[in-house]
Image (cartoon, grey):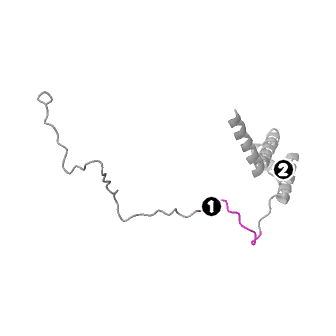
Amino acid sequence: MFRRLSAVSLLCAWLCASGAVLDIAQTVAWTRMFAGYARTESLASAARETFDPGKPCQICRAVGKAREASERHGPGVPSAGAEKIVLILDRGAPFVALSAQRTWPGVRSALAPERSGDVPVPPPKAGDA
């Protein structure tokens, strides 16, 4: 439950920050305008009337004012002399020392004898063949 709530909250915050809420409001306004015009006119003239910039509805005007306000008060464009913010740290490759010897050195124990020949294998039993 908590995970779902946090995901929905994050989605709502992203929609508000990216301005998608204004896009949704504009789409709702166009849909309402188109449905209103389609009741009395043909579909082509209803679409023409809906997207006519000279006849905005009240919602369209409110969305336009909100867009202007967000452009005025939004984040400014950084100047050429502004300090860069590093978001990703690029580290160099780690140093790995390689030896000239490619195999592990043999360990000689002073306590255990070292075998030089093959291990003797007993002959097969008569019943196993």
Residue 75 x, y percent position in the rendering? 80, 59
Residue 103 x, y percent position in the rendering? 33, 58
Residue denoted by label 2: 63
Q: Are marks 2 and 1 in contact (CB under 8 Å)?
A: no
Residue 21 among magenta residues: no
Residue denoted by label 1: 89
Question: Could you tell me the amino acid type at mark 2?
Answer: Val
Query: In this orientation, which residue lies closer to the viewer: 91 or 27?
Result: 91
Taking the image as shown, residue 90 lies to the left or right of residue 4, namely left
- Please report the residue visible at 55 percent of the width from the left and 64 percent of the height from the top: 92
Query: In this orientation, which residue lies closer to the viewer: 127 or 93?
Result: 127
Could you tell me which quadrant the N terminus lies in? top right
Highlighted magenta segment, given as a residue range:
79-90
Query: In this orientation, which residue lies closer to the viewer: 77 or 101?
Result: 101
The tag earlier along the polypeptide, 2 or 1, is 2
Taking the image as shown, residue 71 lies to the left or right of residue 121, namely right
Element type at marker 1? loop
Residue 93 x, y percent position in the rendering? 52, 63
Question: Could you tell me the amino acid type at mark 1?
Answer: Leu
Could you tell me which quadrant the C terminus lies in? top left
Q: Residue furthest front?
A: 111
Cα distance, mark 2 to mark 1? 40 Å
Residue 14 in the image: above or below residue 125: below
Number of other residues with Cα within 10 Å of mark 1, as a class: few under 14, some 14 to 19, many 20 or more: few
Taking the image as shown, residue 50 lies to the left or right of residue 115, namely right
The prevailing secondary structure element of the residues shown in magenta is loop
Residue 82 among magenta residues: yes
